[in-house]
Amino acid sequence: MSDHLDALRLFVRLARRGSFSAAGRELNVPQSTVSRTIAALEREIGAVLLTRTTRAVALTEAGSDFLARVEPILADLDEAEHAVRGSGALKGLLRVGLGTALAMRVVIPRLKSFADRHPGLQIELMLDDQRQNLVADGVDVALRFGVLTDSTATVRRLVRWSRALVASPAYLETAPPLVSPSDLTAHALIVGPHGIGDWSFRRGGTVVSMRLDGRLRIPALEGAITAAIAGMGIVMASAGACRKEIESGALVRVLPDWDLGTVDLHAMFPAGRAAKPSARAFIAYLSETVADD
């Protein structure tokens, strides 16, 4: 039974890695062992699960279906073992889907403390600025900003950050005066992840809505903030995402008396199966550590 479970876990790891050598390195077994184990598994179930080339491994149609059925079962077994063990120690692999800027600015600076608490846990940050398919890509939990479109996933809001307009001191020194939202029409604007649209500014009972565009468009937040630091203009970002730059003085808030609304950071768990204990623990930890930003 144990050998069969090990073979199934190896298959899942191989399917996600797309490489015999990568799967072998992660599990600390020779590539030849990986190949023999998968071949034996295919003989046992009577189906070809993978196509092999000199460079990569790809799932067959049967392999994709097998993966979709096996992976949730293994996750349930991991959870059952965790519940019986009752020690709080987490093991296995935790796969977190998120964008690059969110990883660099929010998650990675906080990761060491969580990893130190659970030395038996492997953590994979699946960095992709395009939103992953949680089930198809084997994501245990995803972190996403803004409005969510996947109504089947289990969602938890982690934090609500205010939006802010920011620019570098060097840009503001030579830029036209900026007292009210209408003054933005005379400024260089960087179109970041929020895109082009109607920006609403509120102060007291006053609401000003403007449709603003910019010469420079950078849909990746990290690039947009870097451009603002370089003095290329004003960008809108969440106050939490650019907190360090504001605190260091690299960026300055523009029109700070005006409210630009908020943006939410959510955790999303894939539908159809219970969330892994490691995913729940990670999100609980992250929720505590980002609450004060």
Image (cartoon, rainbow, N blue to C red):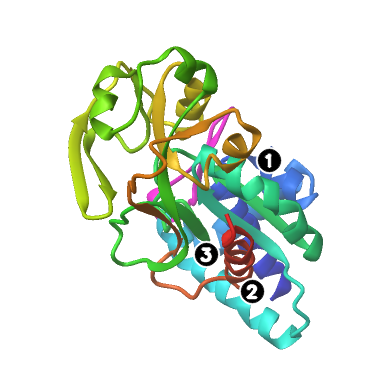
Q: In the image, what residue occupies the spot 19% across and 42% down?
A: 208
CB-based contact (under 8 Å), mark 1 and mark 2: no
Of labels 1 and 2, the one closer to you? 2
Residue 231 visible to an observer of this rendering:
no
Mark 3, Cα crowd under 10 Å, few <14 / some 14-19 / many 20+, is some
Q: Marks 3 and 2, how far apart in space?
A: 11 Å
Is residue 59 on the magenta stretch? yes
Q: In which quarter of the image is residue 93?
A: bottom right
Q: Name the residue under label 3.
A: 71
Q: Could you tell me how far apart the alpha carbons at marks 1 and 3 are, in whole angstroms?
A: 19 Å
Q: Which span of residues is magenta-colored?
A: 48-63
Amino acid type, residue under disc 1 in the picture: Ala
Q: Assign the C terminus to one quadrant of the image.
A: bottom right
**Among the two numbered marks 3 and 2 on one chain, the one whose residue lies closer to the N terminus:** 3
The structure residue drawn at horizontal position 63% and vertical position 82%, both measured from the top left corner, is 80
- Examine the rendered structure and indicate whether residue 4 appears above or below residue 139: below
Side of 194 where 276 appears, left or right: right
Tell me the element at label 3: helix
Q: Distance between the residues labelled 1 and 2?
A: 22 Å
Which residue is rendered at x = 44% and y = 38% of the image?
129
- Which of the pair 277/167 is nearer the observer? 167
Give the image location of residue 4, x and y in percent. 66, 68
Give, as a three-letter code, the residue at label 3.
Answer: Glu
Q: Which residue in the protein does label 2 denote?
A: 78
Q: Do the residues labelled 3 and 2 touch (CB within 8 Å)?
A: no
Front one among 130 and 162: 162
Q: What residue is shown at x 76% (from left), y 53% (from top)?
A: 112
* Tag 1 residue: 22
Could you say where residue 130 lies in the image, as x and y percent from the top left? 40, 40
Under circle 2, the secondary element is helix
Residue lying farthest to the top in this orientation:
174
Front-most of 204 and 232? Answer: 204
